[in-house]
């Protein structure tokens, strides 16, 4: 896969039996005619290209097992295992592949079978609190509440956010890094064994560039990870907070957000290296279960020539 260019062709249209239909907005495409249970090399090549060109890919009416989900995900790269049992409460009643993470509010004998419950999950990119961040994530609907119960998943593009920054902000963020707090999880809960600090400058967590150059597309994305308790290195706390607030306003601008309402048979995969996602709360009297697999990503880097890199084809706010 070569570098994407500002005039590069978007993958859209029909390729034999496979059809790729871009979603409205700054990211996303639905791929039709591709059966993940019988994925061959040609089909995977088209799927991977759609993933790199559109960041977010939706496949409807899929019928795959946990083992097949793991096999398809592994084609994208080495898999990350779910957090150790000491870090979370899931999997007590899950006997599937160890590479699968259960995302659910369901309980068996009063014990959660999965993570994240039924409340809101804040905007974030997976594993941004590690030196090596997450790459592709695949999420498969196993059990869903009624549509009116809530629980939609929203996505926003780091490519589009970077492109939308005024030159004043680009001048500020190129060459700067953010300390990504590792003490708290996506639900703002203190991780087991972690210690909270008063001064964010003293927190534990990796330093990642604000402008991350994607290793596969060669394009720049705004990489913020998560808003909660992060710090822009080298600034006062007040200036860091102000800059982060401004950057996040571009990243989650409503023009930059794609919302997915889940249906039975849905499989969604996306690139954590250049996007963030968020889940709304849903009716706690209903049950929801999704199965996730996570590909290992890379350590974010801002290229030496980042300022002259091409814009990603889906890099515009609409």
Image: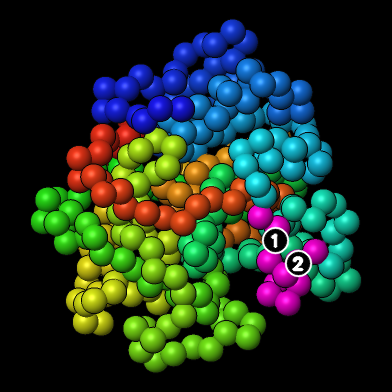
Q: Is residue 25 visible?
A: no
By secondary structure, the bulk of the magenta-drawn segment is best described as: loop
Let me know if residue 160 appears in the view: yes
Can you give x and y, in whole percent of width and height, for residue 171 in the image? 14, 56
In depth, the one of 106 and 239 nearer the eye is: 239
The residue sitting at 61% across, 30% down in the picture is: 59
Asked if disc 2 and disc 1 are in contact, CB closer than 8 Å, the reply is yes
Up-down relation of residue 206 to residue 281 (above or below): below
Secondary structure under the numbered disc 1 in the rendered image: loop
Q: Residue 310 location in percent, x, y?
A: 26, 34
At 56% from the left and 22% from the top, the residue drawn is: 46
Q: Foreground: 141 or 185?
A: 185
Query: On the image, which quarter does residue 73 sit in?
Result: top right
Query: Residue 42 appears at what percent x and percent y?
Result: 63, 18
Give the number of the disc on residue 252: none
Which residue, as the protein is rendered here, is positioned at the far front? 304
**Which residue is the site of mark 1?**
82
Tag 2 residue: 90
- Residue 194 image-quadrant placement: bottom right
Magenta run includes residue 81: yes
Q: What distance separates the C-alpha of mark 2 from that of mark 1?
A: 9 Å
Q: Which residues are magenta?
A: 80-91
Say what secondary structure mark 2 lies in. Answer: loop
Q: Earlier in the sequence, mark 2 or mark 1?
A: 1
């Amino acid at each position: 896969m070569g570098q994407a260019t500002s005039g590069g062709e978007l993958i859209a249209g029909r390729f034999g039996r496979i059809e790729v239909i871009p979603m409205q907005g700054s990211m996303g495409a639905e791929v039709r005619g591709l059966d993940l249970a019988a994925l061959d090399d040609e089909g995977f090549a088209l799927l991977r290209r759609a993933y790199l060109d559109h960041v977010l890919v939706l496949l409807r009416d899929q019928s795959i097992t946990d083992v097949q989900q793991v096999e398809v995900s592994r084609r994208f790269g080495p898999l990350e295992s779910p957090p150790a049992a000491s870090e979370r409460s899931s999997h007590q009643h899950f006997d599937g592949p160890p590479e699968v993470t259960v995302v659910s509010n369901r309980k068996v004998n009063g014990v959660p079978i999965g993570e994240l419950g039924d409340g809101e999950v804040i905007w974030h990119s997976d594993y941004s609190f590690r030196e090596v961040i997450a790459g592709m994530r695949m999420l498969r609907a196993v059990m869903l509440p009624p549509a009116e119960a809530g629980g939609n998943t929203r996505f926003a593009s780091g490519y589009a956010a970077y492109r939308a920054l005024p030159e004043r902000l680009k001048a500020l963020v190129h060459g700067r890094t953010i300390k990504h707090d590792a003490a708290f999880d996506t639900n703002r809960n203190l991780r087991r064994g972690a210690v909270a600090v008063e001064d964010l400058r003293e927190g534990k967590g990796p330093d990642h560039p604000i402008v991350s150059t994607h290793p596969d597309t060669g394009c720049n994305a705004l990489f913020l990870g998560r808003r909660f308790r992060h710090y822009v290195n080298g600034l006062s706390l007040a200036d860091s907070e102000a800059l982060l607030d401004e950057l996040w306003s571009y990243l989650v601008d409503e023009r930059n957000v794609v919302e997915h309402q889940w249906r039975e048979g849905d499989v969604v995969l996306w690139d954590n290296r250049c996007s963030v996602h968020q889940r709304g709360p849903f009716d706690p009297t209903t049950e929801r279960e999704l199965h996730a697999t996570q590909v290992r990503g890379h350590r974010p880097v801002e290229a030496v020539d980042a300022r002259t890199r091409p814009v990603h084809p889906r890099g515009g706010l609409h």
